[in-house]
Amino acid sequence: MKQGAATARSNIALVKYWGKRQARLNLPAVGSLSITLDALATETTVRFDSAFESDDLVLDGERRPEQLERVSQCLDIMREMAGVSLHAHVASANNFPTAAGLASSASGFAALVAAANAALGLDLSERDLSILARRGSGSAARSIFGGFVEMYPGQDDDGLDSYAEPLLAAQDWPLEVIVAITAQGRKAVSSGSGMARSAASSPYYGQWVATHAQDMDVARSAIAARDFEALATVSERSCLKMHAAAMATTPPLIYWNGVTVECMHAVSAMRRRGVPVFFTIDAGPQLKAVCEPTAAAAVRSELAEMPGVIETLHTGLGPGVEATVSAP
Ligand code: PMV
């Protein structure tokens, strides 16, 4: 029996990833830049044992055979690296709502590859873990690291140049995030199929890709200078460009509900009043308001009072993936 465990945090992209340059190795068409969220964590245990007849996945206490294929694909690569053919049982628990657009796949695959690395004694570098996590989910490559993180799209066909790297530690610019939950339940269209459909039919997809690198440059400089206003402007622009490309897809991909839109207006109005806050939204209806710590309490109470907001979560920026001691 070989067992390992790890904890990883979710992340949200400020400059978004949307679209793949190669589907087989899950290579992104564009880079991305994210922050890792301290309070949204996944803890995963991986156990390899000769007694197991197949791989198995239990997520938040429920068996999830429909999600096993992507997990087994990651494990197959790692089994081959370790020269091991044992099946594995994976148990994963999120401390936040799964698949409500809060990037459970990001923390999930980062924790999975780190736990399997510990179990198999592979001693892989963080870069190798980032490359492996990317195979499961593009955003997972970023959850290997804490604070502000950049993901490179790379150019090579083997994908070995497509990984994430830390840009700035969490404590060096300790922004905070309020998540406004505006709907419960799983999203209708996964980001993977949404991206494929946008690339195939959105007239704005080409422009999204063509104008992306300049947003990355602006965001990188804003972070280096701790320039909140510049980061706010480029982050909202990247979010709205991604959603514009998605909305113009046939059939359309509208990830927001009415409450999401009301929250966007509320955040914009707060910033006009001088509150240091901006919004970002992934492929789902939840709004994330990124703010300076001094503004967090006011931002949270304003969003919590918006009609239709079900719940708010408050988090700081967190560390990268951590291997943990697993129960025997
Ligand atoms: O890595 P995936 O398949 O979860 O896709 C992530 C896509 C977005 O969340 C919309 C943007 C991003 O960069 O995280």
Image (cartoon, helix red, strand yellow):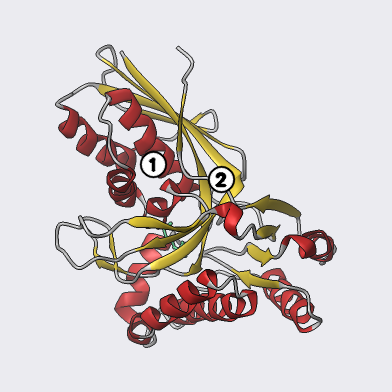
Q: Quadrant of residue 183?
A: bottom right
* Kind of residue indicated by mark 1: Gln
Q: Residue at x 44, y 59 (%)?
A: 190
Instruction: Give residue 67's mark.
Output: 1
Q: Residues within 10 Å of mark 1 (few under 14, many from 20)?
A: few
Rendered residue at 77%/84% (across/down): 272
Q: Which mark is residue 98?
A: 2
Of labels 1 and 2, the one closer to you: 2
Classify the position of the C terminus by image quarter: top left
Question: Taking the image as four quarters, which one is ligand 1 found in?
Answer: bottom left
Which residue is at the front of the view, 202 or 42? 42
- Dot 1 or dot 2: first in sequence order is 1
Residue 175 lies left or right of residue 223; in this view the side is right
Considering depth in this image, is 97 or 276 the residue closer to the camera? 276
Q: Amino acid at mark 2?
A: Thr
Q: Is mark 1 within 8 Å of ligand 1?
A: no
> Circle 1 — which element?
helix
How far apart marks 1 and 2 lie (CA) works out to 13 Å
Q: Is residue 256 left or right of residue 59?
A: right
Give the label on residue 201, or none.
none
Q: Nearer the viewer, residue 149 or 256?
A: 149
Residue 69 visible somewhere in the drawing: yes
Residue 243: image x %, image y %? Answer: 50, 76
- Left or right of 100 in this view: 6: left
Residue 102 position, x and y percent, is 56, 54
Q: Nearer the viewer, residue 84 or 308?
A: 84
Q: In the displayed structure, would residue 92 be above or below residue 24?
A: above
Q: Are marks 1 and 2 in contact (CB under 8 Å)?
A: no
